[in-house]
Amino acid sequence: MNELSPIRNFDLADETLLLDTIDRWLEKEVRPVVKDHDHDDRWPAEIVEQMREFGLFGATVSPEYGGLGLPAVTYARIVMRISSVWMAITGIFNSHLMLALAIEKFGTPEQKRTWLPKLASGEIRGGLALTEPDAGTDLQGIRMTARRDGDSYVINGTKTWISNGIQGSVFALLVKTNPAAEPRYKGMSLFIAPKGPGFTTGKKLEKLGYKSIDSAEMVFDNYRVPGDHLIGGEEGRGFLQATGGLELGRINVAARGVGIAEGALALSTEYAQIRKTFGKPIAEHQAIQLKLGEMATRARAARLLTLDAAAAFDRGERCDLEAGMAKYFASEAALENSTEGLRIHGAYGYSKEYDIERLYRDAPLTCIGEGTNEMQRMIIAKQWIKRNKVT
Ligand SMILES: Cc1cc2nc3c(=O)[nH]c(=O)nc-3n(C[C@H](O)[C@H](O)[C@H](O)COP(=O)(O)OP(=O)(O)OC[C@H]3O[C@@H](n4cnc5c(N)ncnc54)[C@H](O)[C@@H]3O)c2cc1C
């Protein structure tokens, strides 16, 4: 039984209504502006406000704190649909939801009452700050320290690559409260860190894709945070708290991969029936059919793996293996389908006039975020062997 996944049911009619509304919004408000926003790397203020109105900043937060309390299956379907048009904007609410999840699952009753309603409504937005310049995959190697000083903690160090780093105002911040602890994870703690004196954000990092959402460096120089901002109120639990949302996090990245894989398939299917060579649409050439056949199969397999992991999560089952497989497969499907889609578009795939180039630039992030795919395969194998032990 997975304690992190409350069993949630959501009426199918409500889900259909929500997904239809999101589809209409995507076509009317997002698709027409995505190219310009992406090419100019511009913060999509109106789109963020519309996502707030839909309740997406509280999508997985419990209704008792003002959230929608969506099951993972419904949440994954929303992320798939949005990502098929513009993956980057899902990061704006997903990183925020990872912060909310850490507080809801591990916070004290007071922390939940104080922070969750404001996060669920999107009144304040934020993210999860784990990575440092010298520590990403090896999270236990972080150097940021928090030293107790009276009723507060003094934090020093640097984070990098933090999504929503500039636009957000509060972050779940992973630090070392005991840098000498062995094993290393026992010296780690997670704080709720609102922006204030001593907490500065660098400029927006320049990226290949995943534009418009800001990824930033954060510097903490004698930043002081009250003791009651320590999540759960006890030191030494930060590593488990920071990684405790990984199953849902991986289902989310898998859903982004599905969206890109399906988006690339849709663009390519349309283009292949319009573009003609040698007197017929390229869709009638066998070489293109082979690509479309593989792309359609990959997209469908990625979708089914992701929904399977999400359903296990909603049933309250342990699903680290399933979520890992979904994340790994769907993100590779995104990369392969966007690459094949680009090739189907010929020279136009290389042009900034066509949407496929954005999917091609956005896809690689899904292979890095929430555990790189190199690590993912090792995690899958370890779990697989554990579940299939020869006795
Ligand atoms: C656009 C973007 C947004 C991000 N948003 C956030 C965010 O909001 N919050 C946050 O905390 N972080 C964020 N990150 C950081 C991200 O989580 C890290 O980049 C990721 O964890 C990998 O860490 P790294 O880049 O330091 O790579 P490294 O850990 O240096 O890894 C480099 C390579 O070595 C491989 N590798 C590492 N260790 C092993 C091993 N033991 N065995 C085999 N291979 C190994 C990796 O798979 C990778 O291929 C973001 C990154 C990007 C690009």
Image (tube, grey):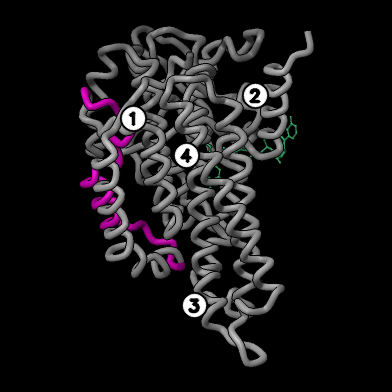
Q: Which residue is mark 2?
A: 141
Q: How far, Cα to Cα, is label 2 from label 3?
A: 43 Å
Q: What's the residue type where badge 4 is placed?
A: Asn
Q: Amino acid at mark 2?
A: Gly
Magenta segment boundaries in residue numbering: 39-64
Q: Residue at x 41, y 10 (%)?
A: 149
Q: Crowding at label 3, few (<14), some or many (≥20) Cα neighbours within 10 Å?
A: few
Name the residue at 40% across, 33% down.
Answer: 72
Q: Quadrant of residue 6?
A: top left
Q: Earlier in the sequence, mark 1 or mark 3?
A: 1
Classed neighbour count for the residue bearing mark 2: other residues with Cα under 10 Å, few (<14), some (14–19), many (≥20) = some
Q: Indicate whether 353 appears above or below 212.
A: below
Q: Position of residue 270 (x, y in %)?
A: 50, 73
Identify the image quadrant of the C terminus. Answer: top right
Q: Which residue is mark 4?
A: 252
> Is residue 208 located in the magenta-colored stretch of the structure?
no
Give the quadrant of ligand 1: top right
Residue on which disc 3 sits:
353
Query: Which of the two discs, 2 and 4, sits closer to the camera?
Result: 4
Position of 344 with respect to 391 (left or right) is left
